[in-house]
Image (cartoon, rainbow, N blue to C red):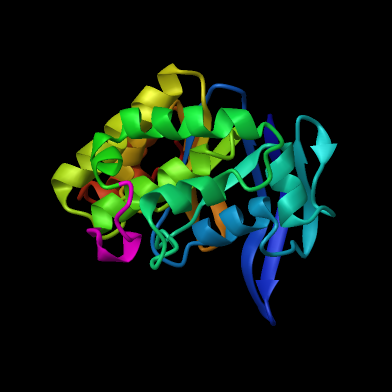
């Protein structure tokens, strides 16, 4: 469904992505793990159209979307839940979710889908008229995910959804991703929390210094000496292949 081919990107003269190749098939949860400043958020911004690649191609269902604007990509089925949530703090939960469906022509179905989001996140249903800025970080993350789902995406991009959240909320977000996957949602998950990401993913990529350093199933990456060293406290090893 989604394919990045030889994607490179710069901020001014600083190259942040180097010939990244990445694929996400329909129905997969693909994890993009890596340390802070590895290039994960830049990758997500490129897919969403918030930044332009220096070179390479981004395809959705085989169609090159690199020249397209962000609104056009949303209409084609790309929805980004950004790092840091970026909710509309002065607006209510209901207003935030409604904004997620701003481009949809099926206006009669929006109310039904909002109720489906409240069923998925009961806490939001209880606080539908509360201003989002007054909610906890975990609740705001639920709003951000629900807002992204209101776009009815083909591919949901989750950028650091557990960053700064308490472990109990991390578990809730993990369960939500698993539930969405079971319902057939295609997800690209960028995460520093490698343990969580590898637990919910069907495949994974390790991004280091702007380049893909390892890829494979979660089991293969967990067994990779490089991933073990970086994330699971294993001693350094000469082997680095996943």
Residue placed at 71% from the left, 55% from the top?
70
Magenta segment: does it hold 224?
no
Q: Quadrant of the N terminus?
A: top right
Q: Quadrant of the C terminus?
A: top left
Camera-side residue of 236 and 13: 13
Q: Is residue 31 above or below residue 216?
A: below
Q: Is residue 113 above or below residue 103?
A: above
Residue placed at 44% from the left, 27% from the top?
217
Q: Position of residue 9 (x, y in %)?
A: 69, 65
Residue placed at 20% from the left, 50% from the top?
233
Which residues are the magenta region? 128-136
Q: Position of residue 6 (x, y in %)?
A: 74, 50
Horizontal side of 64 relative to 211 (left or right) equals: right
Camera-side residue of 150 and 195: 150
Horizontal side of 150 relative to 221 (left or right) equals: right
Q: Position of residue 159 (x, y in %)?
A: 46, 52
Quadrant of the image occupied by residue 179? top left
């Amino acid at each position: 469904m989604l394919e990045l081919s030889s994607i490179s990107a710069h901020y001014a003269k600083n190259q942040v992505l180097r010939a990244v190749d990445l694929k996400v098939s329909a129905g997969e949860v693909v994890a993009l793990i890596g340390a802070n400043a590895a290039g994960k958020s830049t990758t997500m911004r490129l897919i969403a159209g918030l930044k332009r690649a220096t070179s390479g191609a981004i395809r959705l269902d085989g169609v090159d979307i690199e020249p397209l604007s962000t609104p056009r990509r949303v209409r084609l089925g790309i929805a980004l839940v950004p790092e840091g949530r970026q909710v509309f703090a002065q607006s209510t939960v209901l207003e935030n979710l409604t904004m997620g469906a701003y481009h949809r022509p099926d206006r009669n179905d929006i109310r039904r889908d909002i109720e489906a989001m409240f069923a998925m996140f009961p806490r939001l249903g209880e606080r539908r008229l509360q201003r989002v800025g007054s909610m906890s970080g975990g609740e705001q993350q639920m709003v951000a995910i629900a807002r992204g789902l209101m776009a009815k995406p083909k591919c949901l991009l989750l950028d650091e959804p557990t960053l700064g959240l308490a472990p109990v909320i991390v578990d809730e977000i993990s369960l939500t991703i698993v539930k969405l996957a079971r319902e057939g949602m295609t997800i690209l998950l960028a995460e520093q929390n490698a343990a969580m990401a590898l637990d919910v993913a069907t495949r994974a990529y390790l991004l280091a210094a702007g380049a893909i350093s390892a890829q494979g199933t979660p089991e293969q990456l967990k067994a990779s000496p490089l991933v073990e060293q970086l994330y699971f406290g294993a001693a350094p090893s000469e082997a680095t292949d996943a």
